[in-house]
Image (tube, rainbow, N blue to C red):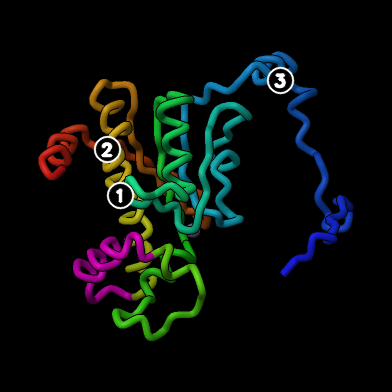
Amino acid sequence: MLGNDCRFGYDMAAVNLHLSYNFHRKDQNLVSSLAEGQAPPYMIIACCDSRVDPCTVLNLPPGEAFVLRNIGNMVPVYSAQSACSSAASAIEYAVLHLKVKHLVVMGHSRCGAVKALMGIEDDGSNRFSEFIEDWVLILKNASKKVKSIHKVAPFAEQCTACEKEVVNASLWNCLSYPFVREKMASGDLTLHGGYYDFVSNAFESWTLDLSCLNDVDKVQ
Ligand SMILES: [Zn+2]
């Protein structure tokens, strides 16, 4: 455990990190505008994976996207008890306070989180971490669905299918948040799925069909 006398240094050169992004020089008007506040049109939920930074992939400048990154770009289902949820608080802030127009869940190729989810034995006997399984298992239905539909496919193909299924499952879970449904119903928010294959440098996107809102309301 860290003691109270622990000190942290700020020798950024030691870890080869330095400020190189110079949008201050490029667009002073943008800096002045952002100094007053942010009004991003997009919220993007993406994976922590170092290869798939969403603003780099989509060429979005500062101020365009409110970004949540977590293991596997996953959204937990709404719960009134989720007071410690990073995802829920970020979605609430983006939708209700920033009033983003588009919520995008972006999956990607070769996702280690999805591979972990797909590799978990039903009895949990191959558990390998303290936290990771518990997190990715919030979308265990996605892996079950893929294993059921793609029974005979090689594991790598199953994982690719699950990477997209996780996006859809997360979008579906977004609909469990009452304020998301309300904004969608009023036409102020659109949900999108996205998938980035960084190996072939291909990006595909799709929009959640509004008609499913009725189905969600029926099961509430
Ligand atoms: Zn990932």
Distance from Cα at disc 2 to Cα at disc 3: 34 Å
Q: Report which residue position mark 2 lands on.
A: 208
Say which residue appears at 42% left-offset and 43% top-offset: 88
Q: Secondary structure at mark 1?
A: helix
Look at label 3 and name its amino acid.
Val
Residue 159 image point, x, y percent: 37, 66
Q: Residues within 10 Å of mark 2 (few under 14, many from 20)?
A: some
Say which residue appears at 58% left-offset and 47% top-offset: 53
Q: Quadrant of residue 171?
A: top left
The answer to whether residue 3 is visible is yes
Q: Where's the N terminus, which quadrant?
A: bottom right
Say which residue appears at 60% left-offset and 41% top-offset: 56
Q: Report which residue position mark 3 lands on.
A: 31
- In the image, the segment drawn in magenta is 137-154
Earlier residue among tags 1 and 2? 1
Earlier residue among tags 3 and 1? 3
Distance from Cα at disc 3 to Cα at disc 1: 35 Å
The secondary structure making up most of the magenta span is helix
Q: Is residue 114 magenta?
A: no
Q: Secondary structure at mark 2?
A: loop
Instruction: Decide: is 84 above or below 66.
Output: below
Look at label 1 and name its amino acid.
Asn
Say which residue appears at 47% left-offset and 32% top-offset: 93
